[in-house]
Image (spheres, rainbow, N blue to C red):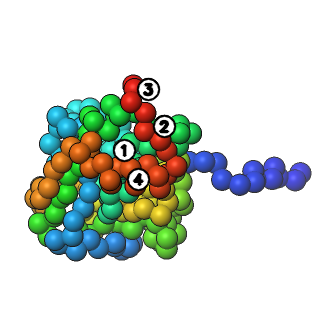
């Protein structure tokens, strides 16, 4: 009797961490000490925040499934931080002024080089996954965060491509207590009029003076 053919194409979710992961070296994406990193956050919160918080369930892509540690999300560029926080609904063509006004842009610098697991380009196949790790459902990603946090190489977190602009590299830094971040600049996003206008134009969005 002929076997059932395999379904064509991907399922949409990233593969789970393979059993062999602890025995292989993690491909590293280094982030130099002193490199400026970008964080866009609600203004009432400190920019250095490892979410989602004690005993809270995972909320974002690489939050720990086991709740053993928090995660700090950063962009290598202002574009990456902006698109990942402000433009999370790509079908919406307008952004409200209240969304901009509620947030701040902070520049952070790590106290040492960061060794991030490279979960893009050739790092995907080396780790046994695919680009759904950046664009697919969150559940496998939380399990990957736990697996990489426990790995003997003790990486500082995960470098991955933005779901909303795959030309941008983002960082999910694990809470280990082995690195600190200095805040060099923190400004209300609404005060960065030229930068915000340029970002909205880049992504073909318009600003409206109303709540959405």
Quadrant containing the C terminus in the rendered view? top left
Q: Quadrant of residue 32?
A: bottom left
Q: What residue is pinned by disc 2?
A: 94
Camera-side mark, 2 or 1: 2
Q: Secondary structure at mark 4?
A: helix
Q: What residue is pinned by disc 4?
A: 199
Tell me the tag on residue 212.
3
Q: Quadrant of residue 80?
A: bottom left
- Name the residue at 17% across, 72% down: 33
Q: How far from the left and from the top, in percent, is residue 164? A: 49, 51
Q: Secondary structure at mark 2?
A: strand
Q: How far from the left and from the top, in percent, is residue 141? A: 43, 49
Camera-side mark, 1 or 4: 4
Which is nearer the N-term, disc 4 or disc 3? 4
| Dots 3, 2 in contact, CB < 8 A | yes
Camera-side mark, 3 or 1: 3
Q: Alpha carbon of mark 2 to alpha carbon of mark 1: how far?
A: 14 Å
Left or right: 10, with 175 as reference point: right
Q: What residue is pinned by disc 1?
A: 85
Which is nearer the N-term, disc 2 or disc 1? 1
Q: Residues within 10 Å of mark 2 (few under 14, many from 20)?
A: some
Q: Alpha carbon of mark 3 to alpha carbon of mark 2: how far?
A: 9 Å
């Amino acid at each position: 009797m002929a076997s059932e053919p395999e379904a064509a194409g991907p399922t949409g979710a990233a593969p789970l961490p393979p059993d062999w992961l602890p025995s292989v070296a993690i491909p590293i994406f280094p982030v130099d000490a002193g490199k400026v990193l970008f964080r866009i956050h609600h203004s009432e919160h400190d920019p250095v925040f490892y979410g989602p918080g004690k005993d809270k369930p995972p909320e974002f892509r690489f939050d720990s499934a086991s709740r053993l540690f928090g995660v700090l999300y950063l962009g290598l560029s202002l574009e990456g931080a902006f698109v990942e926080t402000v433009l999370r609904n790509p079908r919406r063509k307008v952004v409200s002024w209240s969304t901009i006004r509620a947030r701040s842009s902070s520049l952070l610098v790590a106290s040492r080089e960061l060794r991030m697991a490279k979960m893009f380009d050739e790092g995907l196949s080396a780790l046994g996954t695919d680009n759904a790790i950046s664009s697919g459902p969150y559940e496998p990603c939380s399990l990957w965060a736990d697996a990489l946090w426990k790995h003997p190489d003790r990486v500082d977190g995960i470098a991955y491509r933005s779901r909303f602009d795959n030309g941008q590299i983002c960082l999910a830094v694990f809470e280990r207590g082995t690195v600190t971040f200095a805040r060099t600049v923190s400004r209300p996003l609404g005060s960065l009029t030229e930068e915000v206008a340029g970002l909205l134009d880049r992504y073909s969005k318009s600003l409206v003076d109303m709540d959405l």
